[in-house]
Amino acid sequence: MIPKELEYSDLAPIPDKFYRIDALVRENEVEEFQLPEKLRNKPGKLILFSFGSLACLDANLMRKFVEFIADSSHRFIFSMGALADQMELPDNCWGDRMIPQTKVLSMVDLAIIHGGNNSICETFYYGKPMIVMPLFGDQCDNAQRVEEKGYGKRLDPYRCTKEELLDAIEVVLKDEEMKEKMNQASLRIKRDLQENDISRVIESLVK
């Protein structure tokens, strides 16, 4: 599962028996989500900050980013994870232990994510520019491809400064070419997913 825009056909031939699917997003099962009142009348773009279920267990790292985004002129929806009770969010930020990420992605202008495969695919599905801050595993490769292909920026979560993060946010939000590339990727993915039914491929293999 990887968006076509990030696959490696530019570096090596794709194997004949390789079958790619862009994303697995069930829109009709997504929980309803309304923008919290705390953020409704505030200025600025709307940004998702989500580091998945494992990375958010690093409480010191999460508190660092909470401190960083407090000085941003934008609004944030923050996925706090299991250690939510150890964080206090600033006025420009609303968060919860768990949020309906796909529903939130449909609303925001930018996603700041750790780069896990699900988050990458979901962000592409909704056509949102991204800042990817990988910690381990496939996240590092995903983040590198996103930056190489011009769909976002990569930052080191442990080394980046407040200025680097806030500057990256402004750069990505103002990049109209990147926004259009993401929009076109989203349109293609939604069109192709209607035509390419992975269930038919699986059924053909197990019959």
Image (spheres, helix red, strand yellow):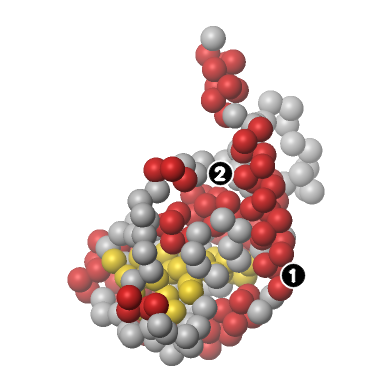
Q: Quadrant of the C terminus?
A: top right
How packed is label 2: few (under 14 Cα within 10 Å), some, or many (20 or more)? many
Location of residue 156 with respect to 151 vertically, above or below = below
Q: Quadrant of residue 69?
A: bottom left
Q: Residue furthest top?
A: 207
Task: Give me the residue at 78% from left, 48% from top.
Answer: 11
Location of residue 128 with respect to 3 vertically, above or below = below
Q: Nearer the viewer, residue 127 or 19?
A: 127
Residue 146 location in percent, x, y? Answer: 64, 60
Question: In this rendering, would 194 be left or right of 53?
Answer: right
Residue 204: tell me if it is visible: yes
Please tell me whether mark 2 sits on a helix, a strand or a loop. loop
Whole-Å distance between the Cαs marked 1 and 2?
23 Å
Q: Residue furthest left?
A: 85
Residue linked to disc 1:
177
Q: Are marks 1 and 2 in contact (CB under 8 Å)?
A: no
Q: Quadrant of residue 164?
A: bottom right
Q: What type is the residue that disc 2 sits on?
A: Ala
Task: Give me the residue at 54% from left, 17% from top.
Answer: 203
Q: Nearer the viewer, residue 47 or 155?
A: 47
Q: Which dot marks residue 23?
A: 2
Residue 63: tell me if it is visible: no
Q: Quadrant of residue 52?
A: bottom left
Residue 196 location in percent, x, y? Answer: 64, 32
Q: What type is the residue that disc 1 sits on?
A: Glu
Please tell me whether mark 1 sits on a helix, a strand or a loop. helix
Of the image marks 1 and 2, the number of the one nearer the N terminus: 2
Residue 72 location in percent, x, y? Answer: 47, 87
Q: How many marks?
A: 2
Residue 95 location in percent, x, y? Answer: 32, 70
Task: Give me the residue at 42% from left, 84% from top.
Answer: 42
